[in-house]
Image (tube, rainbow, N blue to C red):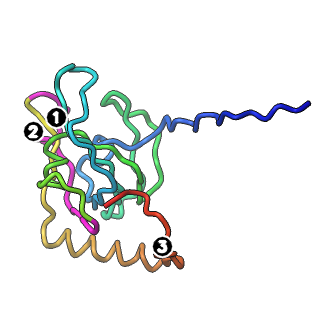
Amino acid sequence: MTVTDPFADPAPIASEFASADSFRGRLVMIEPTRLELDVPNQSNPGNVADRLTATVTTLDGQGRVEIYSYKAPTGKFLEGPTHKGVWFSQERIVKAVLPERVLREGVRVLGRLETFKPGKPAGPGNPWGIVAATPQEKAQAAQVLASLTLNNPVEDIDPFAPKDAPF
């Protein structure tokens, strides 16, 4: 007699991912895909913060991004330029991308991730934020994005298929 296993194995957990540190100073386009409101902070019980999940695309033409672990560079890199599923729980980043705390389709924020005191480690008194792109950077980003679009033509998409994130 054969017994069918009614349980699914857990999906592998990605151990390598991009973080705010990975994008420090880089010209990036942030496209939110999910917003979680008032997520409890495990290291500070009683505190909550919003968490943004986004697709982050580097548009500066500088190539791959480095992976950081506990704010330290690992020497490992992620190819790009598009990085899906990046989490941001830093208040200034979340508010810069979604100031009304509402996820809307089509949001694309362009800028550079940097701390309040540029080049210094993020932490209390030195939070992450997004510096607005200059007109020249916007023009550069538009050219890089157009190049990416031309090199990766959009496949036929079923307009009735479920979306990855609810809007």
What residue is rendered at 13% in x and 44% in y? 92
Gap in Å between the C-alphas at discs 3 and 1? 46 Å
Residue that carries the numbered disc 3 in the rendered image: 160
Gap in Å between the C-alphas at discs 1 and 2? 6 Å
For the residue pair 158 and 113, the one nearer the viewer reads as: 158
**Label 2: how many Cα within 10 Å (few below 14, some 14–19, many 20+):** few
Looking at the picture, which amino acid does disc 2 mark? Lys
Looking at the picture, which amino acid does disc 1 mark? Lys
- Quadrant containing the C terminus in the rendered view: bottom left
Marks 1/2 in contact by CB < 8 Å: the verdict is yes
Pinpoint residue 37: horizontal percent, then vertical percent: 22, 42
Left or right: where 132 falls relative to 24: left
Pinpoint residue 112: horizontal percent, then vertical percent: 20, 55
What residue is rendered at 17% in x and 55% in y? 98
Which of the 4 image quarters holds residue 49? top left
Inspect the magenta stretch and tell me whether residue 106 lies in it: yes
Q: Of the two numbered discs 3 and 1 on the same chain, state the one appearing first in sequence.
A: 1
Gap in Å between the C-alphas at discs 3 and 2? 46 Å
Residue that carries the numbered disc 1 in the rendered image: 120
What residue is rendered at 9% in x and 41% in y? 116
Give the answer, above or below, for where 104 lies relative to 20.
below
Pinpoint residue 52: horizontal percent, then vertical percent: 27, 47
Residue that carries the numbered disc 2 in the rendered image: 117
Which of the 4 image quarters holds residue 87? top left
Mark 1 element type = loop
* Predominant secondary structure, magenta span: loop
For the residue pair 157 and 153, the one nearer the viewer reads as: 157
